[in-house]
Structure formats: C-alpha cells, structure tokens
Image (cartoon, rainbow, N blue to C red):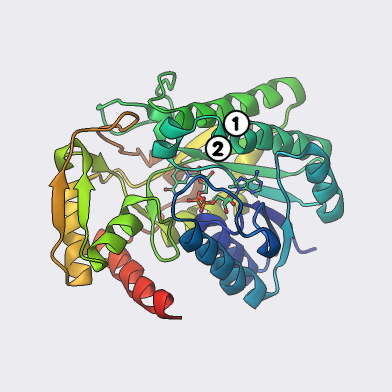
Amino acid sequence: MMRKVLITGAAGFIGSKLAEYLHVRGFEVVGCDIYNFRNAFFDVGDSNHLFIQKLRCDRIAHFLHKNQIQYHAVDLSDNAAVTKLFSNVKPHAVVHLAAQAGVRHSVKAPLDFVKSNLNGFANVLDACRNFAVEDFLYASSSSVYGARTTAPFSEIDRCETPESFYAATKIANEVMAQSYYSQYKTTSMGMRFFTVYGPWGRPDMAPMLFAQKMRQRLPIQLFGNGVLKRDFTFVADTVYAIGQLLQKGASRRHADVVNIGHSNPIQVTDFVSTLSQCLGIEPIIELAPMQISDVPLTCASDEKLIELIGEWPHTSLKDGLTEMTKWLEKWQIT
Ligand SMILES: NC(=O)c1ccc[n+]([C@@H]2O[C@H](COP(=O)([O-])OP(=O)(O)OC[C@H]3O[C@@H](n4cnc5c(N)ncnc54)[C@H](O)[C@@H]3O)[C@@H](O)[C@H]2O)c1
C-alpha cells in the first residue's frame, strides 16, 4: 500500500519542495496550509505581503497543483478543523512544518507566534496520537541553541536559554513532544533546521532579502558588523534529509531531535561576497550592531543525522546561491 504523508505548511518554502520530492518518490502526499486563494491576505507578520502572497500562491501552483497533490486550506490552531483534516486524510505519516517563522518578527510581535507555534503544534501532536500516526516529524530550529559559541552544536547540549520568543516556541514544541512520549508513547522526531536557503526561499531571510535589495541597488544591513556566522543549508539537501528520516522510520524510536545542518559556518561578509558574484552586482553594505534576538554563531554537528541516514548531500554555497539567483531572475518575470 502507498504510504500517505500529510505535510503541513505545504505552501511554505520547505513544505512545498518536500511535497514534490515525496510525490516523485511514490508517496501519496497531501498538503495543507492556512493559506488559501480566497483569503490571500492572511497576515503572516511580514511587511512584504504582496510578495509573500505571490510566492505562496506560485509554490502551490508549481509544486502541488502541477503534480495533482491534494491540498487543504486549514488553520491548524483550530482543533476541530485539525480533527476533521486527520479523519478525512488518515495519514500514515505527518511532517509538520507549519509555523509562524522569523526570529526578528518575534521581537516585534511575540504573540503572533502563540497561535500557530503553540496551539497549532499541540493540535497536530494530539491528532498524531489520536489517529495513531506511525511517523511524526516536525520542524524545530537551530535557534533552540541560543547564543552559545562553542561549536559544533550537539543534540545533547542543554537548550534552556532562548534569545527569542520564536526559539522559545520551538523549545516548547520539543518539550511537548517529549511529554506525549512520556504520557502516551507517541514517538516523534524534531528536526533542527539551520538557515535553509535556495530557490522559492523566504523573503524575510538573509539570502532572499539581500538578493532582492542588491538587485534593486539598495543597501543591505549586516548586523553584528558582518561577523556573525551561519551554517547555511541548501533546501534540496534539507528535503533529502527529511525524506531519508521518513523512509528510515527515524521518528519511531522515542521523542527525539536531530540537527539538519553541515557543521560549516560561513561569516555573513563571505556569504555576501559569494551572493554578489552570483548576481554580478556590487553590494552596498551598511554595518550595524547586533540586534536583540541575534546569535553570533550557528554550527550543527551532523554526526547524529549521519548515524540515522548515512552521508547526505552538501551543496556548496556557491552552487546553492547560483541556483537561487537564477530562479529569482526567472520567477520575477513570469
Ligand atoms: N527556513 C529555515 O531556515 C528554517 C530554520 C529553522 C526552522 N525552520 C522551521 O521550518 C518550518 C518551515 O519553514 P519555512 O522556511 O518553510 O517557513 P514558511 O514560512 O515558508 O512556511 C511555513 C508555512 O506554515 C504556514 N502556517 C503558519 N501558521 C499556520 C497555521 N496556523 N495553520 C496552517 N498553516 C500555517 C504558513 O502559511 C507557511 O506557508 C517552520 O516551522 C520554521 O519555523 C525553518
């Protein structure tokens, strides 16, 4: 029997790609997201609504509709709607990616994160228990590691001092998942993503934000005076890792977490010069102090991931940004 996977956040950056990836590999994929074409102005907390609206709309068309992947518009913070969704779909596996993302936005509006990241997560977790879902994987984040500077970050490190409310909601998700294992033996795998970038990426994150500003010949602000370091992960590598975790049943053991990152942090100034080469545009740089919620470094140990799935692809920053910038030029004129 074909395995049925429900992907939440399927209009999002990672979710839309994952939907196509699993569909092509023979899974029966069902996507859901709060976004629907009639309700285009759902407030995602970003200023650039029109851009985000077009991007979500185009992702659904390109990755889901084109592949005839079933799509449901559901607000996961609505428990009755989640129960209805699970009883209609009856998924064998759930990859829960839906969330209010964005570290910086959580400084401006922390309460925007409660609905999707806490209520939504609890509803999905409870539905996984009630509908006896075999595999439950969900998105956590490198931000759970806080402001530590000892690298690489390991899953056994303590994560109790979040620098943002966004990070606090991700830590809360991991703790909630652990409590469901203690109470009900509901197994799960939290995936701690490290700055995922690539084509169809999020406009609020540095790769897309900087690329857009540079194309418009606008200045880009480098916080922490450009010395912050990030472990950048190409989206196709991320989706490969999620697919492998799913296929290997990695979430069936207990309530576990794993890093999805390469242990290869890159200083933001180096990142900008690679982006500048890919675009063929000189950046206008403004150095700025570190912002509240920023962390100096992210650097994943990927030992545990490799134990679980074996070697996984590592697209170089140059190749990844080349793909991203090529897509951006093409997408904007279509
Ligand atoms: N992209 C990264 O670098 C990164 C890093 C760390 C963690 N994450 C986490 O990975 C997941 C996916 O990230 P992404 O970059 O694809 O984000 P994204 O914003 O592109 O996608 C998230 C999707 O969730 C949907 N959503 C939000 N609230 C919802 C609700 N109440 N009901 C239904 N859908 C809802 C949004 O509409 C959006 O399409 C998120 O949980 C994010 O926090 C991402």
Q: Is residue 316 visible?
A: no
| Amino acid on which disc 2 is placed | Gly
Above/below status of 209 relative to 266? below
136 on left or right of 238: right
Left or right placement of residue 167 versus residue 12 in this view: left
Residue at the disc numbered 1: 114
Residue ID for mark 2: 190
Q: Earlier in the sequence, mark 2 or mark 1?
A: 1
Nearer the observer, 46 or 233: 46
Q: Which is more toward the observer, 209 or 267?
A: 209
Considering the numbered disc 1 on the image, is that residue within a helix, a strand or a loop? helix
Check the image and report above or below for 164 versus 228: above
Residue 44 rendering spot, x and y as whole percentages = 54, 48
Q: Quadrant of the N terminus?
A: bottom right
- Indicate the position of residue 19 as horizontal and vertical percent values: 61, 62
Q: On the rendered structure, is 124 left or right of 204?
A: right
Question: Is any part of residue 60 visible from this angle?
Answer: yes
